[in-house]
Amino acid sequence: MDPTSKTFSALPALLTVLMCLGLANLPQAEANLRSSTTADHTRFKALQGPFERAEDVTAACLECHTEAGEQIRQTTHWTWLYRHQETGQTLGKNRVINSFCGMAVTNEPRCTSCHVGYGWEDMSQPPPTADNAVDCLVCHDTIGEYWKFPTLAGHPSYIPREWPKGSGKMVQPPDLERIAQNVGASSRANCGSCHFYGGGGDGVKHGDLDSSLVNPPKALDVHMSPEGLNFACSDCHSTWGHAVTGSRYQMTAKDQLGIDVPGHTDFTRASCESCHGLEPHNAQKLNDHVDTLACQTCHVPAFARGGVPTKTWWDWSTAGRLDEAGKPIEILDEHGHPSYLSEKGDFRHGENVVPEYAWFDGTVKYTMVDDALDIHNPPVAVNRVEGSPDDPASRIWPFKVMRGKQPFDTQRQTLLATHVFGADDTSLWSNYSWEKALQAASEMSGMPYSGEFDFIETTMHWPITHMVPSAEQALGCGACHSVDSRLAGLGGIYMPGHDRNPWLDRIGWLLVLVTLVGVLAHGIARVIVRGRKGQ
């Protein structure tokens, strides 16, 4: 790794720490850092073009950034693989099934349009190996003019194309020369061009990530808001040699190291504590909760708060219905959001959604395609968050729990890959036939399929960690310590004001009674003494 690039990539994290310690004004320092770059890309001969394709831009970038291509190819953004050290599972987009479009495999090049490269058209094979197959512009475009076309395996469109299909709207090819000459540090919009739109649309998947975070008000996210700290994603998800910290497969659920200190910690923890420390509150009683509650549990009162709804229910079993004329059906709910599409089935959406809560130690275990299901006790957990009140590494975390129905093999009792995208006659979105789509998915992926299927209800947990408003909008004590507690039903804790213990109640009332008797006795005694003095 180039030591100079490593030092530079650490600077945003270092500035963040200094700001949290009160030693730097981060927005100003960060602006100064980004505006003081020593390179004016408009003057580079290699970037003058003309560029016929995006790979040509990458080749020009690599003339100076000689190690960047190899660095990218070592990251999960490239491999889409994650080998979980705790569970032993090999996870990633080409290994796991999710509660949205099922599986990325067999749905190339639609799903690989978000790959940080060009031309991954068959996920049964590794990503392309050429240096110039890496996409520099998707992360480093600063003028908002670069867009990976949704059906071209990571490429932008090089000719005018209609999108969305049937809309009559034409997408024009990007000005590759202008974009290449205006590259810079990644912004929220760069990361969000993929991460905000996971699951098939804006805000669909995560609940706490959507396009409202490109320019959020302080009340939505105090860290990302230009009115607040104006963080880019990389200010928390610090980057070393293009490897981005933070993983939804293995999270830091309970950070016990505290504030990052240069020379002593490695800036790899995308955690609240790495800036705010282990005792972030002025009031000790609030700090007493830190050992049990994740920061997000109190400081993210609801998700999908920016005016973009998130999907909360997706029932694939109803997909495929057509109208009397044999045309696809679209039904909108009272808010104008799709509640039924022939291609995808029934939906429910939510805004300002209160999270669900669970003990979490950072480990997420997945139901893999060859894992047998307990079909007699639905819902099936597509993933399970590990943790318990007896585990000192666990805390109570907020989650979006996605629910729905997905196809499974009734003979093998396993979840099924689904071939939904494609112009061929076997994709669900072309023929509206589950029989064809599931058979094709098996043949394309090599995953076994008996030919018999049904649908089963599933759940999938998504940790909530973004959309943190100002401190005054954090939950009050009564959100938990009340009859209608948010944590009702969660084991392992005793919450005064919500939970009842008969002996504690008796002792409490006895103390109240004793106190009352004492007050009355004291009052009577004073009256008697005063009367005697007056005689």
Image (cartoon, grey):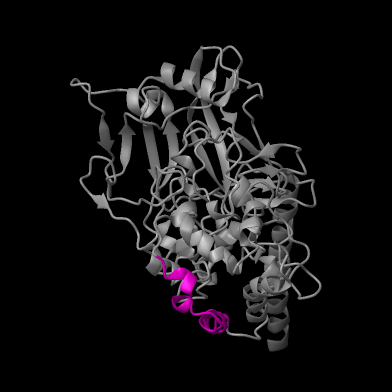
How many numbered marks are there? 0
Residue 432, x across and y down, in percent: 34, 23
Q: Can residue 215 be seen here? A: no
Please state, as top left, top right, bottom left or bottom right, where the C terminus lies in the image: bottom right
Q: Residue at x 26, y 28 (%)?
A: 328
Q: Is residue 248 left or right of residue 181?
A: right
Residue nearer the viewer, 328 or 303: 328
Q: Return the residue nearer the eye: 257 or 288.
A: 257
Quadrant assignment, res 446:
top right
Q: Which residues are magenta?
A: 26-49
Q: Is residue 184 visible?
A: yes
Q: Main secondary structure of the magenta part?
A: helix
Residue 321 location, x and y as percent? Answer: 30, 22
Q: Is residue 279 above or below residue 120?
A: below
Residue 421, compared with residue 130, is above or below; it is: above
Residue 365 drawn at (x, y percent): 68, 38
| Residue 42: in magenta span | yes
Snapshot quadrant of residue 513:
bottom right
Residue 350: percent from the left, percent from the top?
A: 40, 46
Task: Between residue 345 and residue 305, name the one nearer to us.
Answer: 345
Q: Is residue 190 left or right of residue 267?
A: left
Q: Is residue 401 magenta?
A: no
Question: Which image quadrant: the N terminus?
Answer: bottom right
Which residue of the protein is positioned furthest toward the left in this rendering?
325
Front-lying residue, 519 or 158: 158
The residue shown at (52%, 81%) is: 31
